[in-house]
Image: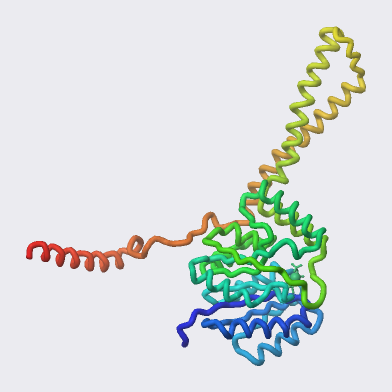
């Protein structure tokens, strides 16, 4: 067995037949220059083209290449999770199969990891995006920054390196509705960023249509923040605080003081205020319900309560070890005392 560290490369693949060969070539070219052992885990996410055939040909040539084939398309998030579950490396690097992310950057990722980063995130410059996507991303990130509980770096991609410890914690997640990068951001840990210019897709069209991206954005917002749920409630409370005093004021003016200001408030207007107040009440109740749903949501997704980066040293926990260490310590003391006497 070699002493080299093992790095797993995880590649979700969905109909990338034309991209696999160029990617694999570039990847092996990069990896060959690095002093690490590598395993490549391709996750074939229900491709309907020749992707799986091409992948299995690759595995036949090299024992360090693995293919996980899904029974149908489960989506990229599931594919990445499957790859992380299977990864055996001391670290794993996730990369798309479409060559939008330069494999040559892995050298930099690994260098940052060796410097102590536990999560290394690839961040691309927004310049290389279509206008609609760029605007969409901008809105999404600004909403996310204001209401989200987890800090999210704009334009952080799934091109990431994760240390073993992060992979293990990630694999403990049981929630189904998952956005990998959001979960990784939630985990914390020491992070570092590598910036790159995103190349256009080599072949084929992105599987994620604009509508999918909107769905993903809505999913992220609802998975990492409960604020959208509460919005309705706040709106209801706002309506109530406006309509109730207004209704009371109008009532006093009209029926108790008999219209001294000559406002001549009509019955219809009273009705409108009343209806508005009731709508406010309903919305406020919805907000209240949302708080309960939020509690259920937190319980159901069953996130770990906390994530530990470093555990206390073994001697603090196990008595067997501590006695051994204490003996060594005593010996050292003996020596130093002896030295003092002498
Ligand atoms: N992908 C996947 N399952 C899907 C959709 C995409 O495994 O259902 C893979 C795809 O093969 C690629 C990566 O996820 O390796 C990113 O997909 P894409 O380029 O379509 O997304 P974008 O670059 O627009 O984020
Ligand atoms: Mg892509």
Coordinates of residue 74 in the picture (x, y in percent): 74, 70
Left or right of residue 220, residue 84 in this image: left
Q: How many marks?
A: 0
Q: Report which quarter residue 45 is drawn in.
A: bottom right
Quick one: 150 or 299, which is closer to the camera?
150
Coordinates of residue 58 in the picture (x, y in percent): 68, 88
At 85% from the left and 28% from the top, the residue drawn is: 275
Coordinates of residue 86 in the picture (x, y in percent): 60, 76
At 53% from the left and 79% from the top, the residue drawn is: 6
Q: Quadrant of the C terminus?
A: bottom left
Q: Report which quarter residue 138 is drawn in.
A: bottom right
Coordinates of residue 120 in the picture (x, y in percent): 58, 66
Left or right of residue 241, residue 173 in this image: left
Q: Is residue 180 visible?
A: no
Q: Is residue 201 above or below residue 230?
A: below
At 76% from the left and 34% from the top, the residue drawn is: 236
Display coloring: rainbow
Residue extending furthest toward the left? 342
Can you tell me which quadrant of the image ligand 1 is in? bottom right
Q: Is residue 216 above or below residue 279?
A: below
Q: Is residue 115 visible?
A: yes
At 49% from the left and 68% from the top, the residue drawn is: 115
Q: Is residue 273 above or below residue 323?
A: above
């Amino acid at each position: 067995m070699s002493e080299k560290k093992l790095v797993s490369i995880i590649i979700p693949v969905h109909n990338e037949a034309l991209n696999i060969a160029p990617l694999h070539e570039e990847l092996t070219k990069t990896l060959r220059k690095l002093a690490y052992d590598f395993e490549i885990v391709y996750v074939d996410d229900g491709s309907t083209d020749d992707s799986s055939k091409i992948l299995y040909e690759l595995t036949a040539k090299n024992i360090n290449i693995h293919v996980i084939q899904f029974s149908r398309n489960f989506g990229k998030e599931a594919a990445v999770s499957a790859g992380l579950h299977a990864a055996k490396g001391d670290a794993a690097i996730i990369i798309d199969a479409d060559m939008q992310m330069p494999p040559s950057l892995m050298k930099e990722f690994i260098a940052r990891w060796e410097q102590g980063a536990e999560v290394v995130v690839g961040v691309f410059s927004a310049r290389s995006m279509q206008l609609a996507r760029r605007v969409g991303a901008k809105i999404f990130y600004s909403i996310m920054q204001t209401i989200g509980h987890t800090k999210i770096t704009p334009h952080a991609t799934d091109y990431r390196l994760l240390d073993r410890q992060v992979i293990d914690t990630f694999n403990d997640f049981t929630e189904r509705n998952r956005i990998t990068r959001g979960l990784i951001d939630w985990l914390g840990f020491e992070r570092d960023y590598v910036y790159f210019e995103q190349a256009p897709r080599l072949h084929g069209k992105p599987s994620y249509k604009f509508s999918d991206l909107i769905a993903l954005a809505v999913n992220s917002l609802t998975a990492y923040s409960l604020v959208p749920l509460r919005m309705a409630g706040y709106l209801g409370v706002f309506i109530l605080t406006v309509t109730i005093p207004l209704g009371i004021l109008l009532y006093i003016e009209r029926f108790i003081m008999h219209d001294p200001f000559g406002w001549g408030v009509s019955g219809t207007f009273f009705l409108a205020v009343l209806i508005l107040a009731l709508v406010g009440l309903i919305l406020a109740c919805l907000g209240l319900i949302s708080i309960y749903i939020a509690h259920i949501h937190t319980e159901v997704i069953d996130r770990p309560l906390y994530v530990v980066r470093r555990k206390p040293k073994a001697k603090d926990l196990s008595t067997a070890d501590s006695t051994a260490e204490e003996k060594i310590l005593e010996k050292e003391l003996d020596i130093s005392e002896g030295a003092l006497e002498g």
